[in-house]
Image: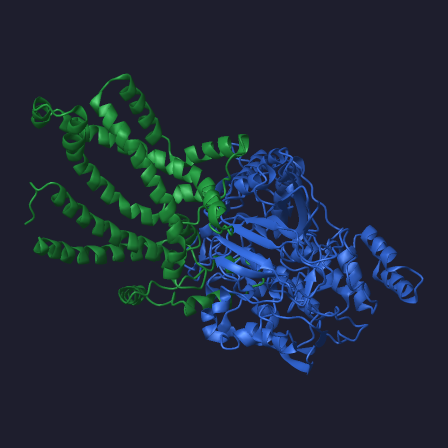
Chain colours: A green, B blue
Amino acid sequence: MSKYVLRRLLIAIPVLVGISVVLFGILALAPGDPFSELATNANVPPDVAQRLRAQFGLDDPLPMRYVRWLTSMLRGDWGFSFQSRMNVDALILQRLPVSLFVLGSAYCLALAVALPVGVLSALRPYSLFDQAATTLAFIGFSLPTFFTGLLFILVFSIWLDWLPFIYRADIDTRGWRWFAEHARQAIMPVAVLGLFQGATLTRFVRAAVLDVVRLEYVNTARAKGLSEARTIGKHVVRNALIPVVTVIALQIPTIFAGAVVTEQIFRVPGIGSLLIAAILASDTPVILAITFVYAVLVVLFNLVADIVYGWLDPRISYR
Amino acid sequence: MDEYAIRGLIREVQAGRLSRRSFIRTMVGVGLTAPLASQMLAASGIAQAQTKPAPGFTPTKRGGGGRLRLLWWQAPTLLNGHFATGTKDEDACRPCYEPLCGFDPDGNFVPILAAEVPSVQNGGLAKDGRSVTWRLKKGVQWHDGKPFTADDVIFTWEYAADPATAAVSVTAYRDIERIDRIDDHTAKVQFKEPRAFWYDAFFGVRGYVMPKHLFKDYKGASSRQAPQNLKPVGTGPYRVVDFKPGDSVRYELNPNYHVANRPFFDVVEMKGGGDPTSAARAVLQTGEFDYAWNLQVEWEVLHRLEQGAKGQLINSPTGNIEHIQLNQSDPWSEVDGERGSVKSRHPLFQDPKFRQALSYLVDRGTVAEELYGQTGQATANFINAPTRLRSRNTKWEFSIDKANRLLDEAGYKRGADGVRVGKDGKRIKLLFQTSTNSLRQKNQAIVKQACAKAGLEVELKSVTASVFFSSDAANPDTYGHFYADMQMYNTTMTSPDPQFFMNQFLSTEAAQKTNHWAGRNPTRWRNEEYDRLWKAAEVEMDAVKRAAMWIQMNDLVVNNVAVIPENWRNRSSAATAKLRGLDLSGWDSTLWRIAYWYREA
């Protein structure tokens, strides 16, 4: 087992180096200039932008910039933002709690909806409940979040005037009011994201339970005289959830990357909106740091998913 | 009214036979308007009113106004005005940092950290334009309690003028030879050469005074490491409590502010990010925010949102001009391995009749009415503000007939398909580029349609804004390369003085390979008379003569059709119905008067 983990970790190294070369190369070739705002301002002489380019090492040859970036990344230095003139890791850490809160809540909501609905519709396939759940799930994941987001704003903010549509991370009240205000402004982004993911997960849970519920051992459990609740709870759902857990583990890195579209619509200051702002401003150190950390997390959680899978299902062995 | 008559009137004012106000009113009447008129008086030694008339609200105590919520759809990324990349940063600095003087909506000077505006009459401004003596306000404190003195003013110059600092305000400060410290609250600025445009350093958004005691170790190359770039300490009405780069700034009232009983609000929050349309919505429709900045949204949409009745739209004039540039060089052939070389001439646009015909084909009236509404107006001039600098000698006209007649006269015959043929026998096809933006694409279509009626085929091209406006020397699609026949964009005039604004027609500024296309003049228009006038204006201390020079330069550009001015744009913003005292100025930051904003009960 430990040999397996070690081998997987060693394989991850060339994979990550490859990813970093591709990321760096694409960003270096992409059009755009971090100091273009200055270039269009008549009051700023062109030598200011040129000096800044030199100061931030943008005029050095590409391989040199890559090696410099990689070595400092290895030392834990994530770089220095052109736009904010601060360390990228500090910038990301500032955004991380909001992303974790909003996306984490959205995931909890998705699970809270998907598990019961998926299991119930699998137990009574093609019943009225299953038909309704399936229809809603299809609607749920065919509507993109930018559409449902705007729809929610229109209905709940503009027509009904119940909820704010601009997210403020910086609420200065204390105690219960702080909590209430945070909850109120998080309702719409969490609902938009959670229902979208919940729709997909519902279909997944339903399929997994359907696979298991027809197996012989379930019949055996029933024949043994176990109550229906016990049969479903201990024998069906538990086994059906094995693939679901892996899917969830693989999606955890996306919580870090934030939800680009939803964050943009509700002005949620998470990692996703930081990424978009950085891309628009050609702030390459920030883009690189976010995308690279995301890549690392994806590789890592793939490994975690594999290990968890083996732990849940002892039939799987590692060589 | 000629120069002689104006001088006569100035003498009347000097003698006290004519009031300041009626002089300015007369000037406005003849087209030389308020901002320059009061400049003219100042230059003639007539004091201008030092303080603005008290606004309708005179509070008896500081604070008590609760929370002010500001919404900027671009988020501030740093809080050092000398490193600002765009107005969002300049604006976010303003509640905290202050210049010596600000600019009011007419371009007049309003003292902020200065005790008075330097003028010839009070001995602050030298007659030869070589020095300015600043008398500073006493009893001003930095937010950390340290006193504000002349040393901070001197340091600000050293800091911003140091090329290694790479400050965006460097042009305002690098022509200062030295600043003499006369006493704690007096400093004398010595320029290297006489400077007519002396009201640049320490004015408006380029004039933020920096605390010496906090920045003295972060001058030059180490400037980017200063912790105060993100946690500023200024003299302004509000102190920064919390700053999340790219998201929001929270300010609280400065209890030691140097103006009595100001400011009004206890807490100010500036939220950034998103898009202009939903920002307008948050003020006009839901009232979640009190003020939304720079709403670059189609007029029709804004107008509809305003029906929500929770707020109102404010259109404040600027000097910004949406215009079409005609390439004066040949973008389609190479000279010395360079397309659009300054050595080449455009095969069609070298003919003045052709350029004039194009000017007739731009339907500025329709563009203004259909696309810009109250957010802009049709204009014939490149310089539109301050009013005193606006030329009355030009006019625009949309006439397909006149264009056709001119083109026929000049010998551009129509081919079998109705499209005209150039002198080289080839069908005429013009490439017209601009940045991707729904308004601009509609605008392009209006021009294309009119050109088609005059037998000119126009091909439209739109380039993503981040590429079009980039300074990337390797990218052929930037506005600096201008590898097209025509292009359109908005040039912003950031100061009430056109000296920098008008350098975009200097022959020395022509964008080309040798300057990595970073020159300010993408049309590569060259005119000796213009160059001479621009140089002369730099040192002309007589405000009347100088105004006449700018008008002359404007007329040269317009009458030679180097560019076709199209729309003089306003800055649109939205405020809740009860917000007062904004006094928005096109020459200074939106928040230049934030200390005086208040909410009506």
Q: Quadrant of the C terminus of chain B?
A: top right
Q: Position of residue B410 (x, y in %)?
A: 62, 44
Q: Position of residue B15 (x, y in %)?
A: 92, 66
Observer able to see residue A319: yes
Q: Position of residue B46 (x, y in %)?
A: 84, 67
At 26% from the left and 32% from the top, the residue drawn is: A115
Q: Nearer the viewer, residue B582 or B5?
A: B582
Residue A296 in which image quadrant: bottom left
Residue B140 in which image quadrant: bottom right
Q: Nearer the viewer, residue B127 or A260?
A: A260
The number of callouts visible is 0
At 42% from the left and 33% from the top, the residue drawn is: A147
Specify whether A193 is left or right of A130.
right
- In this picture, is A26 found above or below A232? below
- In this picture, is A283 found above or below B133? above
Specify whether B312 is left or right of B438.
right
- In this picture, is B116 found above or below B301? below
Observer able to see residue A275: no
Residue A109 in which image quadrant: top left
- Residue furthest toward the right? B17
Q: Position of residue A40 (x, y in %)?
A: 53, 57
Q: Quadrant of the N terminus of chain B?
A: bottom right
Specify whether A7 is left or right of B560.
left
Q: Nearer the viewer, residue B64 or B381?
A: B64
Q: Nearer the viewer, residue B159 or A303?
A: A303
